[in-house]
Image: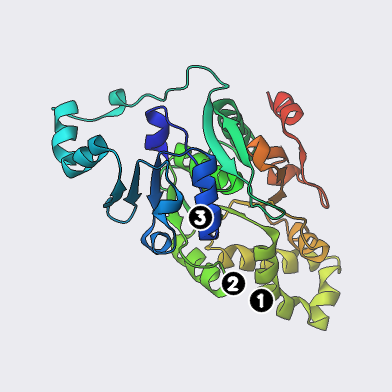
């Protein structure tokens, strides 16, 4: 993704759950010239249905699966030699430049989920990506430390996942771990315990499932229900529940960001009662994606934050 942008090309991420026909439609509609594909997906698609492709490269080991362009074929076969000739002494920061001559230059074509018809290609300029990065720094804070960890569970072909699970933590120097299985509660909790993320970005359904698995059995007890609102011991009980929740997510979580749907009011109230670092935002793929949000300490129940631009002006 980053290499594509450095040489001035446009990146077209594709959702992992798309069917072969949808993948072929996106490749053709976007007029893509090179396709990078995993081995499992490659077995299902038909290269003949994508006649404009000049080459197909397997992501697992960079094997050239198909090439209509002799220059591409020669380059891949002699990659080390070509690289050595272009960078004879070293390859460093000075050799990288992003070809964004102006903010409105196209960076990404992001295809929607296509729930009603064929996916629509959203043309996202550099301005939208940079604006969202600035918003993320304002909303979450620019205080990630090198060595902080994050568990990526959102689709990277959606703008929410691309921003929260890749570009923002990557720019802050965090280490990103990618979840390669469906995020069921048991798999997530095991991965969280191993990774110990400082930031969790997810959809409400995930926290609702974990709430049901971890907290429902505890909160359903009559004595705890009574203590939940009893002055004097209320704060002690809620602090214990918060500590248990934070521990369930690895013990280091400082921000818990949700988006993509409204959260169950009962779950949201429980998290807010225990002062869990929760924030729910709203966004659109077409906006790249942030429209509204607030830091956890300012977040209000049953809301999706404040519109981003006015909030950033107030911060400044």
Badge number at residue 152: 3
Image: 43 above or below 57: below
Residue 215 drawn at (x, y percent): 70, 73
State yes or no: discs 2 and 1 in contact (Cβ < 8 Å).
Answer: yes
Can residue 155 be seen in the rendering of this structure?
no
Check the picture and name the quadrant holding the N terminus.
top left
- Asked whether, in this view, residue 240 is left or right of residue 191, the answer is right
Badge number at residue 185: 2
Question: Within 10 Å of the Cα at label 1, are there few (<14), some (14-19), or many (20+) other Cα atoms?
Answer: few
Residue carrying label 1: 213
Can residue 290 be seen in the rendering of this structure?
yes
| Secondary structure under the numbered disc 2 in the rendered image | helix
Question: Within 10 Å of the Cα at label 3, are there few (<14), some (14-19), or many (20+) other Cα atoms?
Answer: many
| Secondary structure under the numbered disc 1 in the rendered image | helix
The alpha-carbon separation of the residues under discs 2 and 1 comes to 8 Å
Of label 1 and label 3, which has the lower sequence position? 3
The alpha-carbon separation of the residues under discs 2 and 3 comes to 15 Å
């Amino acid at each position: 993704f980053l290499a594509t942008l450095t040489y001035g090309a446009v990146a077209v991420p594709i959702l992992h759950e798309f069917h072969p026909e949808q993948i072929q439609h996106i490749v053709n509609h976007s007029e893509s010239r090179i396709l990078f594909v995993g081995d499992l997906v490659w077995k299902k698609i038909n290269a003949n249905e994508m006649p404009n492709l000049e080459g197909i490269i397997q992501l697992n080991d960079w094997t050239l699966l198909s090439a209509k362009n002799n220059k591409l074929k020669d380059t891949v076969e002699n990659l080390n030699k070509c690289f050595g000739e272009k960078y004879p002494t070293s390859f460093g920061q000075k050799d990288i430049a992003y070809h964004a001559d102006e903010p409105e230059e196209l960076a990404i074509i992001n295809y929607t989920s296509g729930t009603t018809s064929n996916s629509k290609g959203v043309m996202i300029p550099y301005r939208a990506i940079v604006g969202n990065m600035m918003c993320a720094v304002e909303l979450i804070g620019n205080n990630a430390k090198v060595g902080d960890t994050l568990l990526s569970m959102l689709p990277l072909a959606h703008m929410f996942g691309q921003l929260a699970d890749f570009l923002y933590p990557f720019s802050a120097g965090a280490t990103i771990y990618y979840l390669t299985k469906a995020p069921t509660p048991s798999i997530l909790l095991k991965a969280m315990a191993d990774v110990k993320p400082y930031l969790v970005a997810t959809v409400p359904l995930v926290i609702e499932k974990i709430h049901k698995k971890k907290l429902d059995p505890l909160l359903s007890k009559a004595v705890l229900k009574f203590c939940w609102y009893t002055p004097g011991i209320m704060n002690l009980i809620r602090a214990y529940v918060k500590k248990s929740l934070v521990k369930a997510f690895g013990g280091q979580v400082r921000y818990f960001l949700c988006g993509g749907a409204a959260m169950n009011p009962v779950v949201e109230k429980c998290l807010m009662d225990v002062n869990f670092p929760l924030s729910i935002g709203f966004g659109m793929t077409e906006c790249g994606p942030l429209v509204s949000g607030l830091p956890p300490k300012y977040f209000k129940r049953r809301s999706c934050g404040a519109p981003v631009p006015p909030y950033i002006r107030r911060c400044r």
